[in-house]
Image (cartoon, grey):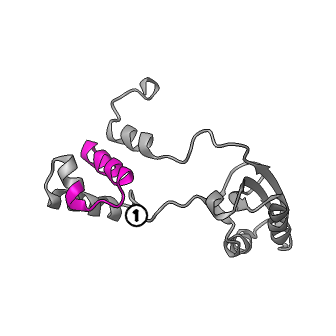
Amino acid sequence: MTIDELDARLIAALREHPRVGLLEIARQLGVARGTAQARLAKLEARGVITGHGPEVDPSKMGYTISAFMLVELAQGRLAEAVESLEELPEVLEADAISGPQDLICRVVAHDTEHLQEIVNRLLANPAIRRCTSHIVLSRQVPPRTGPLVNAAANPQIDTAAR
């Protein structure tokens, strides 16, 4: 499944002005409101657009430490470990990975002591054998999907030329 240039422009407009109504977005794109609505509905139905909520900066809520945590599990206990991760609001995301560790998590904490508490809480679960934390010093490329949306809408353009 791919997207076309109008889909890409619609996504870009929604990301740039998330609080603007669909009628205004359609006007900006030069299409009928029904066209914009239909495109949006299809993108949502296909799972391309997964949400419209506000983006939140954890550091502005006092979570000044951001870290990636590599987690090694006891064999066959993934579901149990995931339950422990889901119980901690500081765990923003977790992905199963290949390699010597089993999961990589993005976590936030108020300070390094709080990060240690998070690690200790996870290690209290026998499904989790080891946690290795890597504190983020600075973000060089923020989370983004715009370039990916443009590449998907224009597959004929050489990626290296972008």
> In screen coordinates, is 117 left or right of 148?
right
> In screen coordinates, is 82 left or right of 23?
right
Regarding mark 1 in the picture, which secondary structure is present there? loop
**Image point (75%, 70%), residue name:** 77
Question: Is residue 52 rendered magenta in the image?
Answer: no
> In screen coordinates, is 23 left or right of 117?
left
Give the amino acid type for the residue marked by disc 1 in the picture. His
Q: Position of residue 78 (x, y in %)?
A: 72, 68
Q: From the image, give the main secondary structure of the stretch colored magenta.
A: helix
**Image point (69%, 58%), residue name:** 105
Q: Which residue is mark 1?
A: 52
**Image point (28%, 44%), residue name:** 4
Quadrant location, the C terminus: top left
Q: Nearer the viewer, residue 80 or 38?
A: 38
Q: Position of residue 3 (x, y in %)?
A: 31, 47
Q: Quadrant of residue 23?
A: bottom left
Q: Position of residue 55 (x, y in %)?
A: 50, 60
> In screen coordinates, is 153 left or right of 116?
left
> Magenta residues, as a range?
1-24
